[in-house]
Amino acid sequence: MFENAATTFASLAILGLAGYSYHRYYKRLVLMKIEGAFKPGDPVLELAGASHKEQHGVSEEEEHNNSLYSRDEQDIVNAIVSGEKLGHYYLIIGEKGSGKTNLLVRGMHRVAGEGISMLEAHGDLEIFRIRLGKALDFEYHEDYIGSLFSIRGPRDTTPLLDIERAFNKLEKVALRRRETIGRPLVLIVNSCHLLRDNEDDQDLLELIQQRAEQWAASKLVTVILNSDDYWVYERLKLNASRMEVIPVTDLPKDRAIAALRGYRRTLYGEEPTRQELEDVYDRVGGRLAFLHRAANAADMRRECEHICETEKTWFLSQCTILGMEADDDTLDQQKYASTAMVLAKALVDKQQEMDRTYDPERGHILPEIPLHEARQIMTRVDFIQKHDHVNIFTIDSRAMVRADSVPMQRAFQEICAQPGFDAHLEGTLQRIGDIESLGRTRELVAKDLWNQGKYKFTTMPAGGRGSGGTSTTVEVVPGETES
């Protein structure tokens, strides 16, 4: 009996020791894997380099070495990703296609991705959780086999709590790195505008900001957020104390022309004339996405015309107004579309009042309106955020509203210059008012009364004299009854 007891005790001891050893080993392995995610050679650089070479005929690294174009913001981003700027976290904000992600990838190339991890945001928390796990090489204990030793693993939970656990592990790795290397880790969350402006994603953004504030204060991790939309900045501004904003706009004229010349020389081995390059800039401005498309086309002028027509078509497809013939069921859509048309007309009118709309050195000067005035013009406060999201208007970090791009402003001008546009817009606004008036109208049906009965209407001040309102009382006066 003693031997059986000793054997059982020894078996349990060995099982417990094995389980405890595995548990300690697994926790150490998790931290080692996260450390490995920040070593040189980030997968984002390989994907970005291959994609860039496929699209533009030149790799990201070759473009960086050749310096086809330069930006003032690049030096700031280089200092951030290399760990030279400490004590802050950053929001990079600008229009779609202005080169925000390119800035980050260039900075990562400079240090070969050492100490940096980058992920793409998503509006679904489950997908964001998986992408964060991939960027940090963290499995959320899904590969944990401690249950074989009767050790309970982490309980099933929500994606937000899993993200919090991933940040806890990242913090431990960052503490180790500060002791050994002395520089912070860099975590980049790209495309934050893909988060939805709802309760779940607002909680996620708040969680990221709380961690970013703590890590910036302790100089453990530098968080960089990248967004196209203004609402992300508006949300972060509420609780920001260590956040710095890096606005990224279109390239000025001289740098846009230099970039276009460099791409054209690399792709086609030709040297365009100054007039040809200026003609491209005059049509599409300094938006990098448009310049890349023009440089890749055999006929740059035709491609510029196509870009302008595409922007115009996009605006009309999103914000077509139907005039006095609009159906009752289109009320909500027509409210959305008419506010965009009203603001577009206001920007066109403001452009006509400006002293200069083009500078020989800076290039295009687009008209802009303060955000609060734009909301007054639209008579709505919520639609401008939706227009910003679909890239019709843009709101910069100074809360100034303007057309999303030079081709979009040209589209505004062409649409507003069409014959009968003002009357069509006025008819649409009148129709919206009529439909809303019908919705507020109630019909009373008065039927004939017996024996010459009558209705008596009495109108008197509501709430006493001087209240400014009136109330109407209806009562029935019975007719004479026959004896």
Image (spheres, helix red, strand yellow):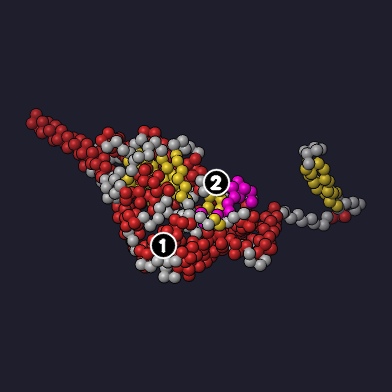
Q: Examine the image and state in which quarter residue 416 appears.
A: bottom right
Q: Using the image as rendered, state which of residue 175 and residue 301 is in the foreground.
A: 301
Quadrant where the N terminus is found in the figure: top left
Query: Can you see residue 147?
Result: no
Q: x and y percent of residue 352 in the render?
A: 63, 57
Secondary structure under tag 2 reads: loop
In percent of the image, x 35 and y 63: which residue is there?
266
Residue 261 shows which numbered tag? 1
Q: Using the image as rendered, state which of residue 265 and residue 376 is in the foreground.
A: 265
Q: x and y percent of residue 287 in the render?
A: 47, 57
Q: x and y percent of residue 96 in the render?
A: 46, 55
Single out the mark in the foreground, 2 or 1: 1
Residue 420 included in the magenta stretch of the image: no
Residue type (three-letter) at the residue carrying disc 2 = Ala
Residue 291 falls left or right of residue 12:
right
> Is residue 192 positioned above or below 418 on the image?
above
Residue 175 shows which numbered tag? none
In percent of the image, x 27 and y 47: which residue is there?
40
Residue 145 falls left or right of residue 417:
left
Within 10 Å of disc 1 (Cα), the crowding (few <14, some 14-19, many 20+) is many
Residue 69 falls left or right of residue 457:
left
Residue type (three-letter) at the residue carrying disc 1 = Arg
Q: Which residue is mark 2?
A: 399
Looking at the rendering, the stretch of residues picked out in magenta corresponds to 362-377
